[in-house]
């Protein structure tokens, strides 16, 4: 028997509305109302850079596969 009798599948679930409100209040208290837009802007910029890098790597892999297919068909 576990100490708190918590089932593991509930630990990984999405937070409900009450938990989201508590998280929002904690963020406001920690960072203040003026810093939240700056944090959101930084988060958006980071996500955009990540997606650009992901797309760049995907394009490089696809072009490498096309070059390999092209060179193998030229050798036949």
Image: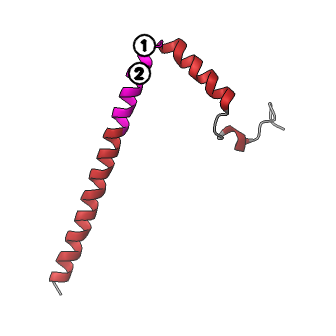
What type of secondary structure mainly makes up the magenta span? Answer: helix
In the picture, measured across the screen, residue 15 lies left or right of residue 54, that is right
At x 62% / y 28%, what residue is drawn?
A: 20
- Where residue 21 appears, as percent x and y from the top left, is 63, 24
In the picture, measured across the screen, residue 70 lies left or right of residue 44, that is left
Q: Is residue 23 above or below residue 2?
A: above
- Where residue 15 appears, as percent x and y from the top left, is 64, 34
Quarter of the picture containing the N terminus is top right
Circles 1, 2 touching at the beta carbon (< 8 Å): yes
- Give the secondary structure at mark 1: loop
Q: How many marks?
A: 2
Give the class, few, some or many, for how many residues have Cα within 10 Å of label 2's Cα (few <14, many ≥20): few
Tell me which colouring the rendered structure shows. Answer: secondary structure
Q: Which residue is mark 1?
A: 34
Q: Is residue 67 above or below residue 56?
A: below
The image quarter containing residue 58 is bottom left
- Give the secondary structure at mark 2: helix
In the picture, measured across the screen, residue 67 lies left or right of residue 53, that is left
Q: Which residue is mark 2?
A: 37
- The residue nearer to you, when weighing 49 against 75, is 49
- The residue nearer to you, when weighing 1 against 60, is 60
- The residue nearer to you, when weighing 7 against 23, is 23
**Of the numbered discs in the image, which one, if any, rests on residue 14?**
none
Q: Is residue 31 above or below residue 55?
A: above
Give the class, few, some or many, for how many residues have Cα within 10 Å of label 1's Cα (few <14, many ≥20): few
At x 59% / y 17%, what residue is drawn?
A: 25
- Where residue 39 appears, as percent x and y from the top left, is 41, 23
Per the model, the C-alpha gap separating discs 1 and 2 is: 7 Å
| Magenta part of the chain | 32-47
Q: Single out the residue that lies furthest toward the left.
A: 74
Quarter of the picture containing the C terminus is bottom left
């Amino acid at each position: 028997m576990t100490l708190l009798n918590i089932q593991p599948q509930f630990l990984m679930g999405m937070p409900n509305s009450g938990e989201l409100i508590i998280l929002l209040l904690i963020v406001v208290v920690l960072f203040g109302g003026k810093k939240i837009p700056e944090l959101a802007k930084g988060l958006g910029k980071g996500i955009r850079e990540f997606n650009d890098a992901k797309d760049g790597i995907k394009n490089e892999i696809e072009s490498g596969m096309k070059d390999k297919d092209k060179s193998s068909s030229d050798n036949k």
